[in-house]
Image (cartoon, helix red, strand yellow):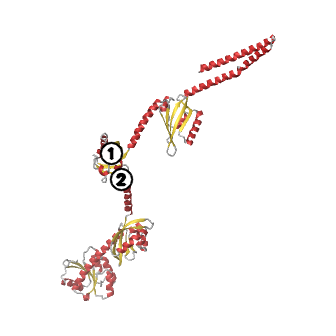
Amino acid sequence: MTNISEVFNILVIEDHLDDYILIEKFLNEEHLQVNLSRANSFNEAQDILDGKHDFKVLLLDLSIPDVQCQESLVKNIVALAPNTPIIVLTRITNKKFGVKTLSLGISDYLLKEDLTSTQLVKSIFYSIERKSIDFKLSESERKYKALFDFSLLPMWVLDKHTLEFLNVNDAAIELYGYSKEEFLSMEVRDLWTSEGKVNIEPIWKENYNNNFDLTVTHQKKNGEILHIEVKSNTIYFDGKEARVTQAKDITAQMDAERALVCSEKRFKALVQDASDLMMIMDFDGILSYVSPSSIQMTGISDCEMIQHNFLHYIHKEDVDSVKEHLLQLKDSKRIQIPSYRIKTSNKKWRYIETIITNLSDDSSVNGLVANSRDITEFIKQENKLIASLKRYDIVAKATSDTITDYDIVNDKMYYNEGIEIVFGYTKSEIGSTANWFNDKLHPEDKERVKMYSEEVRKLKTPNIKIEYRFRCADGSYKYILDRSYVVADNEGNSQRIIGAMQDITEIHNYIQTIEDHNSRLKDIAWTQSHVVRAPLTRIMGLIELIKSYPNIDEQSQLIDHIITSAEELDSIIRKISSKTEQVTINS
C-alpha cells in the first residue's frame, strides 16, 4: 500500500506555467508531501527520464509544443517510463482518445476543467497502487512464463473441459517428440495408453474442479511407453478455465524399482532359499544375519543360530585355523577358509568351506559376509580317492607293467615309472601327446592298431586288448600286450583310456622257439614216415625174392641190392639223428 506520509517525487510535463502552479496548489491543499519537477517539452522530459529517476508518478499534458501527434507523445512517454504510472491532464475532451490512452499504458485520464485537489490526489494514489499491482502481476506472469517455458520438467496447459492443449513447454516437446503445432492440435487423451485410459478418465472426472496427483502411462510419438508422475492444478489461461500440468518422467525410476524387486527376488532365491549358508558377522564372530538355509545344513534354525557366536559351532581342533583366516581380512578384501568342521543339531560334524568378504565399509552390510557350503560328501569321496590312489600307487610299483592314462579330450598322455624302466626313456624324452606314443609303434603295426582302435570306438566297447611292437629308447622293439579300458561320459562319448602295457617279448620269443622246434620235429616225422620207408620196403621185397629164387647167382645180385638199400637207409638214419641233435641243442 502507498504511504501517505512519504515524500512523492513527481514529474510534471507541462508547458503552461499557470497549469503547473495550479497542480502544485492542489497537492499542497491535500497536505501531500511532494517534490515536484517540471519539464516544459518532450525533449526536456526525455533528458530527465533517460537518466536514473525515482518518480512516483508522471503528470502529462497532451499539448506539448515539440510533439504534434498526441498518440505518439503518449507512446514515447510510456516507453521512457514503463514502470511509472502516468496520469494525463488535458483540456481535450475526446473521450474516445481518452479510452485509447488507457490501452496505451496511461493510468488515468483527467480533464483540467473538472480537476479538483481531491480528484488529483485520489488519482495519484490509485494510479500508483494500480501500477504496483500491475507490476507485481506482470512479474508473476513473467516468472510463471519463465518457470513454464524453461522448466526442466515437461509442462502444459489444458482446456479444463475438453482437455485440449492450450500451451506446452520445450521440455514436453523434447520428451514426447511432438512439435508445438502438433501438440496444439491434440488433446491430452492422445498421450494416454489404452490401459491408462481406463484408470485416468474417472480420476479426472472425480477431480474436475480440484487439484490432483497420479501416475499414468503415456505413449511418445515414436510409440515408446513412458511412466509419468502428473501434478495438475486448475487455473485461468487467456480467459479460459484451464488446468496446468507438470509431468515428471519416472520411467527410469520404475525400471529401477522393478530391477530392485527382481534383485530382491534373486537375493531371496540365491541367499534365503539356497542350500549355501550365508552369514554376516564381525571379526569376533558375533553374528548379525544367518540365512534360513542353516536348518538344511546344520538342523539349527537361523533364529537359534544367531543367538550364539559363530566360533561356538566350530570343532575345537579347527577354531584356531578359522580365527587366523578371519584376521587376514583386516588386510585382504576376500579370503577362503579351507575345510573345517561345524556342529549340527544332532551333535554330529559336517565339513564346510567358506568364502568371506570384508564389507565392513559398506553401510548397508557393515560386517563380514560369509558364504559356506557343505563339502562333507566331497571330503568322504576325497578320502576314498586318496585310499584308492594309495592302493593304485602300490599296485603300480608292484607290477612291471607300464600304466597309461590318456585324456582323449585334451590329448594328454600320462605314464607311470614303467615307461622309463621297461623302455629306457628318460623323463625329458617322454612326450605327453598321442602322436609321441603312435610314433613309437612298429611301422608294420601302426595301421593295424589304428584300425582296431576305430573299430572299438564304433562298437563302443569299453575293453581293448591288442598286441603290437613298441620301440625302446635304444631303437629295439619289444612285444607288448596292451589291455585298456575306455571311460565314456553319459552320452557315450569316449573321455579317457586307462591301460596297462605288458612286456611279452620273452613269452613271444619262447613261443617262437617252440614253433621252430615243432617245425623241425615235423620235418623228422615226415622223413621217418616217407624217406625211411622207401629203402626199408625195398629190402623187405628183396628178402622175399631170395626166398623164392634158389639160384645162387641170382641170390648174389639180390644181396647186392639189399646192401645198397641198407647203406641208403643208414645215411637217412644218420640225417635224422643229426636233426634231432640240433633240436636238442636249440632247446
Give the label on residue 346, or none: 1
Q: Is residue 84 visible?
A: no
Q: Is residue 219 above or below residue 65?
A: above
Between 149 and 275, the one lying in front of the other is: 275
Q: Residues within 10 Å of mark 2 (few under 14, many from 20)?
A: some
The N terminus lies in quadrant? bottom left
Q: Earlier in the sequence, mark 2 or mark 1?
A: 2
Give the label on residue 396, or none: none
State left or right for residue 246 relative to residue 445.
Answer: left
**Residue appearing at x 71%, y 21% in the figure:** 531
Q: How many marks?
A: 2
- Rendering coords of residue 82 (x, y %): 30, 76
- The three-letter amino acid code for the residue at tag 1 is Asn
- Rendering coords of residue 527 (x, y %): 68, 21
Q: Residue furthest top?
A: 552
The C terminus lies in quadrant? top right
Q: Is residue 457 visible?
A: yes
Among the 4 quarters of the image, the one containing residue 392: top left
Which residue lies under the disc numbered 2?
272
Between 84 and 270, the one lying in front of the other is: 270
State left or right for residue 316 relative to residue 399.
Answer: left
Among the 4 quarters of the image, the one containing residue 169: bottom left
Cβ–Cβ under 8 Å for marks 2 and 1: no
Q: Is residue 110 above or below residue 305?
A: below
- The secondary structure type at the circle numbered 2 is helix
Q: CA distance from mark 2 to mark 1?
A: 23 Å
- Rendering coords of residue 361 (x, y %): 30, 51
Between 465 and 259, the one lying in front of the other is: 465
- The three-letter amino acid code for the residue at tag 2 is Gln
The label nearer to you, 2 versus 1, is 1
State left or right for residue 126 relative to residue 183.
Answer: left
